[in-house]
Image: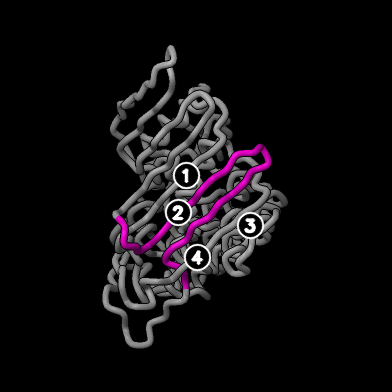
Amino acid sequence: MSTSKSYRVAVIGAGSIAKYSHVPGFQRLPNCEVVAICDVNEARARELADALKVPRTYSDYKTMLAEVKPDIVVVATPNAFHKPMSIAALEAGANVLCEKPLALTYADAVEMFDVAARAGRTLTAGTHFRFTPPMQVAKQQADAGFFGNIYAARTVWQRRNGIPGYGSWFTNHDLAGGGALLDIGIHALDRALYLMGYPKPVTVSGATFAEFGPRGLGLGGWGSDIFIPAAGARYDVDDFAWAFVRFENGAILNLQVSWASNYPETFMTEVYGTEGGGYIAGRDKVELYTMLNKQEVSIQTPLHEAKVSSYFQLIENFVRALDGDKTADIPTREQALTSVQIIDAILRSAAGKREVVL
């Protein structure tokens, strides 16, 4: 990737996603230098910085922003801190890649993008599964008109045992804002919306459950080293959610997500169009369906092996967007807000046991 610009990058949060995706994702780009890592546990930040050869560490993000003056800030902290940290970084003059969910409410997400607009900076979200080979193939087909008008979709990410650490911030409502729905549900939702073209939602019905976590069951997932609930460990988030969304253009969407369930691990998106349909598996399969001369046709689409991870591709596209490359593909304001608006409405629908009209 050739460019005339260079970027100094700072990362807030020294967890697994920073270790395996954010820091190496920027370090692999010749015009980016990761110059600082911040974590409330500075020893943890130092351990990661030493391992990945990052020169500076901090325990206070405001001090880091003032002293380092980064061009790009990654916010990879518990969800409750995404809004204040992103706004502080934007107001300090940085562009921001914020982990998903971008915010805990739609109103908060709107405020974050308004701050970005006033600051003249770019804000985007870490929804990266659009860059997996199956999704790229499906998106190419959607853009080429293979599906015709997509009038329905179903998108699923169900884990059998995948609660990421009982008693960690993931299972603490004050820090996470929600459980499986905010953690992996937003990825499943974004996959479907990406293919549907992010239509405007008008009504949302949802239900959430916590049937495994409170019993100490279903543990084990991304970044987890907690498999036995500690005494007094807190679990007050969902581990299962279903939702039904209607859109202004008449289309509908069913979302199913779980950290734990008595059902096999499932990660897929289905789309139903007037001219064709598709089954898009999580990472390794695309099947297309259509009619040709009144005969059923099923197509097994060959996939190329991804050269780098989907998160690395998101980071590369983010930097390209900052360089002014109009072909760069990142979650835009409208796209990110649509996802957050639906998630917010699902939680409100579940809490009130009613349909939410947007």
Disc 1 marks a residue whose amino acid type is Arg
Q: Earlier in the sequence, mark 2 or mark 4?
A: 4
Give the total number of marks visible in the rendering.
4
State the SS at label 4. strand
Circle 3 residue: 109
Disc 2 marks a residue whose amino acid type is Gln
Residue 208: mark in rendering: 4
Circle 1 residue: 154
Dots 1, 3 in contact, CB < 8 A: no
Q: Alpha carbon of mark 4 to alpha carbon of mark 1: how far?
A: 17 Å
Disc 3 marks a residue whose amino acid type is Ala
Q: Alpha carbon of mark 2 to alpha carbon of mark 4: how far?
A: 10 Å
Q: Earlier in the sequence, mark 3 or mark 2?
A: 3
- Residue at left 51%, top 23%? 275
Q: Percent from the top left, x then y, of residue 143?
A: 52, 26
Dots 2, 4 in contact, CB < 8 A: no
Residue range corresponding to the magenta coloring: 237-263
Q: Earlier in the sequence, mark 1 or mark 3?
A: 3
Question: Residue 225 sits in which quadrant?
Answer: bottom left
Circle 2 residue: 256
Q: Percent from the top left, x then y, of residue 44?
A: 35, 70
Q: Percent from the top left, x then y, of residue 198?
A: 59, 40
Q: Percent from the top left, x then y, of residue 265?
A: 30, 53
